[in-house]
Image (cartoon, rainbow, N blue to C red):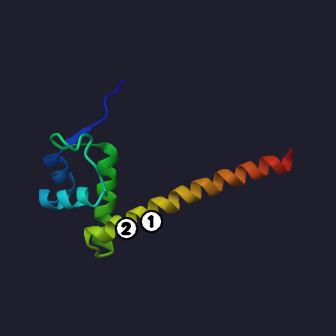
């Protein structure tokens, strides 16, 4: 079984090209969370993916981190609603054909 990739604070900052102070703001806003908040910050691939997505939103839409956090939250909600809608459509289809 392959171990999931982990990133230190410095590594995740280097990958996304942001200073540690900005990462602290991003964590405070709840965009991403370290695996163990009370220890040295270590992040998983999911956190890296979310941070990259938030960073793209921030740059492309010229947002502050707080605006990127809200935009990311809304995009995630839209994704969940689309998945739920697709599931309900499949259930309805099955009911109508039985």
Q: Residue at x 22, y 44 (%)?
A: 37
Secondary structure of the residue carrying tag 1 is helix
- Say if residue 57 shows up in the picture: no
The answer to whether the residues at label 2 and label 1 have Cβ atoms under 8 Å apart is yes
- Reading the image, the residue beneath label 1 is 74
Left/right placement of residue 65 relative to residue 75 reads: left
Relative vertical location of residue 96 with respect to residue 62 in this rendering, above or below: above
Q: Residues within 10 Å of mark 2 (few under 14, many from 20)?
A: some
Q: Residue furthest front?
A: 38
Residue 70 numbered mark, or none: 2
Left/right placement of residue 82 relative to residue 35 reads: right
Q: Position of residue 11 (x, y in %)?
A: 16, 46
Using the rendered view, name the quadrant where residue 50 is placed.
bottom left
- Quadrant placement of the N terminus: top left
Residue 94 numbered mark, or none: none
Relative vertical location of residue 5 with respect to residue 31 in this rendering, above or below: above
Q: Residue at x 31, y 49 (%)?
A: 47
């Amino acid at each position: 079984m392959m171990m999931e990739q982990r990133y230190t604070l410095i590594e995740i900052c280097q990958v996304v090209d942001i200073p540690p102070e900005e990462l602290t703001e991003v964590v405070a806003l709840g965009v991403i969370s370290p695996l163990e908040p009370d220890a040295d910050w270590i992040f998983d691939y999911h956190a890296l993916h979310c941070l990259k997505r938030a960073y793209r939103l921030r740059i492309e839409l010229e947002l502050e981190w707080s605006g990127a956090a809200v935009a990311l939250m809304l995009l995630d909600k839209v994704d969940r609603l689309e998945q739920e809608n697709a599931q309900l459509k499949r259930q309805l289809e099955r009911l109508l054909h039985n």
